[in-house]
Image (cartoon, helix red, strand yellow):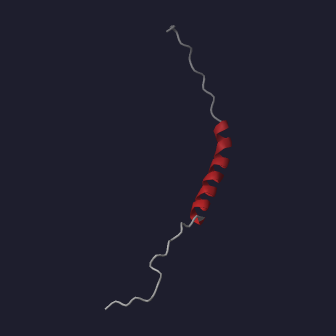
């Protein structure tokens, strides 16, 4: 026979936002570090078009 220990069955669980904040800070750090690297790209000389459209 199961006994009820008198616990609160209607307890609402809260969302733990600490892991979310940690992930967002890591993503922000990655974007801050990689954004300046995107500016140093390899220059490409594209050929001119020979016909007009």
- 23 up-or-down from 41: above or below: below
Residue at point 60% right, 22% down? 45
Of the pair 47 and 5, the residue shown nearer to us? 5
2 in relation to 49, above or below: below
Describe residue 31's horizontal placement relative to residue 13 as left or right: right
Q: Furthest-left residue in view?
A: 1
Q: Is residue 23 left or right of residue 6?
A: right
Count of marks, rendered view: 0
Is 48 drawn above or below residue 9 in the view shown?
above
Position of 3 relative to 27 (above/below): below
Q: Which image quarter is the N terminus in?
A: bottom left
Which residue is at a point 58% across and 64% down the rendered structure image? Answer: 17
Percent of width and height locating residue 33: 67, 48
Q: Position of residue 48 (x, y in %)?
A: 56, 14
Query: Residue 38 appears in which quarter of the rendering?
Result: top right
**Which residue is at 46% across, 84% downward?**
7
Q: At which x and y percent is residue 2?
A: 34, 89
For the residue pair 24 and 4, the one nearer the viewer reads as 4
Q: In front: 9, or 46?
A: 9
Find residue 20 and report its image quarter. Answer: bottom right
Residue at screen point 57% across, 64% down: 19
Q: Quadrant of residue 47?
A: top right
């Amino acid at each position: 026979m199961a006994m009820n220990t008198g616990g609160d069955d209607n307890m609402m669980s809260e969302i733990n936002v600490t892991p979310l904040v940690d992930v967002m800070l890591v993503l922000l750090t990655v974007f801050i570090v990689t954004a300046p690297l995107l500016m140093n790209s390899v220059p490409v000389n594209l050929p001119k078009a020979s016909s007009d459209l």
